[in-house]
Structures are given as C-alpha cells and as structure tokens.
Image (spheres, coloured by chain):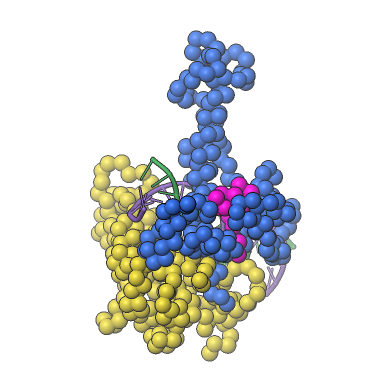
Chain colours: A yellow, B blue, C purple, D green
DNA sequence: GCAAATTAATGATTTATTCAAG
DNA sequence: CTTGAATAAATCATTAATTTGC
C-alpha cells in the first residue's frame, strides 16, 4: 500500500522544499475543514507525526501549510464574495447559491462524540455586506477575522502561568479518518507534554518553543 | 546594585512576558549594530544561552527581539529619512538653482535653522502604488533591504541548480563578551553596511527547526 | 511524444500590523 | 508610551502543470 506513491515527498535530503503527498494534503485539508485553522505547537507536533507515515515531513511544513492555506482560502473567499456581490445585480441569485467553500463541514458530519476539541473557528460566513457605502476592493466590511481569537485563547486555557494546558490533551486531534486509520493518539505522542515545566506553553504561539529545550 | 530589574526577568513562571535585563538588551543591541539583523535558529540558540546568565530567557524572546528591533529601527530610519529629505529643501545646497515656482519658496532663502514646518509637497516621486507589497508612507523609494534578485540575477549567477549556499554553516556568533566588550567578530557577521550581498545570507531557516529534531 | 518555455500553485520568508502587558 | 508577542499580508522562490514547436 504505502509503497509506490512516496516518490514526491520522500526524497529526504533532496534539499528544496517539502512536497506533500496526496494523503498528507488530504488529511490537512480535512483538519482544516473541521475547523482547525491555527494549530498550536503541540497540535502541529501531533499532526506532523501522524503525517510522517506518508512521507518525509517536518513541523514547519505543517505550520506553513496552515498559514498559507488559511491565507489563500481567505483571499479566495474574498474574491468569491465580491463576485457573489456583483452577481446580485446581474441575476438575482440567492445569497448563498451554492455551498461556498466557506468553512462548513464537508460531506459527512463528523461523529458527534469526537467533535474535535478545538473551538471551531466561528462560521465566518459574512457574505453580503449590503453596505451601500464605500467598500474598496473587498465587499466584506472587515476581514479582521482574527478579532477576538488570538489572545482569548490564552486566557481561556491559560497555559503559561501554570501549565494547566494538560487538559488540552483532550483535543483529540485525530478522530479524522481520511484513508488511513490513525486512531486516537492513545498516549503515544504526547512526547513533550508530560514534562513538568512543559516549558513553552503552547499559547497560541507556534514554532518557537523549540528553541530551547531548556 | 542592579536593583529590582533582575527579578523582573528572572521570574520563571511569572507568566507574562519576558522582561529583558539591561545586560541582555545591551548585548542584543550590540549584536544588532554589528550587523546581525535576522539571526538563524542556531544563532538564536547561541545568543539565548549566552544571555541566560543574566536571567530567564527563551529563544523566542531573542527571535522576537530581533524582529521587532529590526522593524522599529527601520521605521525610525524611515522617518529620519523623510526628515532628511525635506531638510534638503530647507537648507543646504539647492538642487534646483532657481526656486521653481511650484512649491517651495517662501520669500527668501531661509536661514538654516528655520524650520519650514510642514512638509510641503515635494516631488512626491511616484511612490509606486502598484505594488501592494510595501511602501506605506515613505518618501524613500523603498528600501527593500533584502532585495534578492528580481528574477534576473539568478540566471546570472545560476544558483538555483544546486542547493542554497549551505556553506553558511556557523558563524561564530560570540566573540562577544558578556561584559559587553565584544571584540571584533572575525569576519563573520560582517557589518551589514553597503553591498547588498551581505547579511541576508544568514537566513537558513529561522525558528521552525525545532519542531522536529528530525 | 518530448522537452524547452510559460504559466499556475504553493511552499517558505520577510514585513507590516495589531494587541496588550508593564 | 514603550515594547514583547502574535498574526496576517505580502513577497520570494521552487516545483507542478500547461502550452508550444518540433
């Protein structure tokens, strides 16, 4: 099964850039569609290790993937919103003609029990501004889509002050089942967490931690 | 004698943000002034460990410090450049012998220290609004200080075909002395002055690495 | 069919902006 | 107000698609 398709990404010291396999892309997209937009460092770690069975991959790849994917989904969305907006004048189509690629869950609803720990990132479907005023290039009034997101999570979980983030291990990153099985973590990964200091606190921050293993 | 400062940063689990000591700041600024603008992961590691003797510090602190310092130095510089630019019209040799009827010229050639307050409308020099990328409100034509190559130099030197100059290796970051002497760095960091070729070579991936120790 | 030449996608970096602690 | 921290936007750079002439 795993034999043939590793060509693209498995070149280890190939040098240049990561070339994700279909499976990797698939899983990443699934996670994204399930609401994971900005994974924490721990989450990235877990994802990375899960995806490694499909080929060479590093944490930074996962990190970048989410960054880029989020950004590009956003700009695509913006475009589509503009188009949708103008299309209203052409032929009156419903505001939500087809299921835009917004965020909404794909084909199947995920099993209720898993529900993916993380706060799914608000539905974000703020189409149709209806503002007769002056929009510039984007119809959407403000895409400050990060609004209350970033710091609030810190307070929510408050990782730094007392490493209570341990509860976070409930995030259950992989109820996902794209092709492979990859059952829940079963306490395998959690490599970095048990440590007392847990140092880095994942606090929204990604990367970094690493720098110092203390 | 250092009084209260040290405890500020030494508080390990204090929770919030890093509070650098004077020594730490000092050393960081020295490094910066010596030309180190964007340290690599390894460099950050080294710096961090060196600076730890003065108090609690993590790699991300060093990373952020350089990021912020570079950005804020840049914008300060930008301001100063604007001022310098205007000052050219105020005093010093006129580029245009006779005062054009356009803008300038109050009544007489102004005494050197008269400050002609507001920026009159200097030529404006076409701030190139096309690029969404940079340029905000600066006269300076954009110092893209990293300016690699507009796609053309590549062919010139043909770097791509083979890896990135991985020879980069480790530049011995620390001829620097904790006390602040920092004698010459022996041609590693090489002051970032002139010559575009200089520093941006140190990239070699910042942060990230860590995610996976591979 | 096939490579060279273009173009489109997208991985990887850097820069600008924002938020909030002190 | 200063500045550490974090994220988003812009940009660079490389790989995959694709076109094109043979």
Task: From the image, give the main secondary structure of the stretch colored magenta.
Answer: helix
Q: Give me the residue at 59% from left, 68% from top.
A: A17
Q: Identify whether B71 is placed above or below B95.
A: below
Relative image position of residue B173 (x, y in whole percent): 65, 59
Question: Front-most of B174 and B76?
Answer: B174
Left or right: where B69 falls relative to A148? right
Relative image position of residue B117 (x, y in whole percent): 45, 22
Relative image position of residue B191 (x, y in whole percent): 67, 48
| First to last magenta residue range | B26-43
Is residue B37 shown in magenta? yes
Relative image position of residue A70 (x, y in whole percent): 42, 63
Is residue A164 shown in magenta? no
Left or right: where B36 falls relative to A138? right
Question: Front-most of A110 and A149?
Answer: A149
**Residue A66 visible in this rendered orientation of the protein:** no
In the displayed orientation, state which residue is furthest to the front: B1
Q: Give me the residue at 53% from left, 74% from top.
A: B212
| Quarter of the C terminus of chain B within the rendering | bottom right
Q: Identify whether B166 is placed above or below A20.
A: above
Q: Give me the residue at 60% from left, 13% from top.
A: B98
**Residue A31 visible in this rendered orientation of the protein:** yes
Q: Quadrant of residue A158?
A: bottom left
Q: Quadrant of residue A170?
A: bottom left
Label count reads 0
Q: Give me the residue at 30% from left, 64% from top.
A: A155
Question: Front-most of B74 and B186?
Answer: B186
Q: Identify whether B90 is placed above or below A102.
A: above
In the displayed orientation, state which residue is furthest to the top: B107
């Amino acid at each position: 099964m795993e034999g043939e398709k590793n060509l693209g990404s498995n070149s280890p010291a190939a040098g240049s850039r990561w070339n994700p396999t279909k499976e990797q892309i698939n899983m990443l997209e699934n996670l994204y569609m399930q609401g994971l937009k900005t994974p924490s460092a721990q989450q990235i770690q877990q994802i990375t290790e899960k995806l490694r069975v499909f080929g060479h991959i590093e944490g930074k790849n996962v990190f970048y993937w989410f960054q880029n994917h989020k950004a590009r989904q956003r700009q695509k969305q913006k475009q589509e919103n503009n188009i949708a907006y103008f299309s209203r004048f052409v032929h009156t189509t419903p505001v939500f003609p087809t299921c835009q690629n917004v965020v909404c869950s794909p084909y199947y609803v995920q099993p209720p029990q898993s529900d993916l720990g993380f706060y799914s990132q608000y539905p974000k479907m703020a189409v149709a501004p209806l503002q007769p005023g002056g929009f510039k290039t984007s119809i959407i009034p403000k895409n400050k889509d990060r609004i209350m997101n970033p710091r609030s999570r810190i307070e929510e979980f408050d990782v730094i002050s007392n490493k209570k983030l341990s509860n976070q291990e409930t995030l259950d990153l992989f109820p996902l089942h794209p092709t492979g099985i990859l059952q829940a973590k079963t306490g395998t990964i959690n490599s970095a967490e048990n440590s007392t200091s847990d140092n880095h606190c994942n606090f929204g921050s990604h990367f970094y931690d690493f720098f110092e293993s203390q």
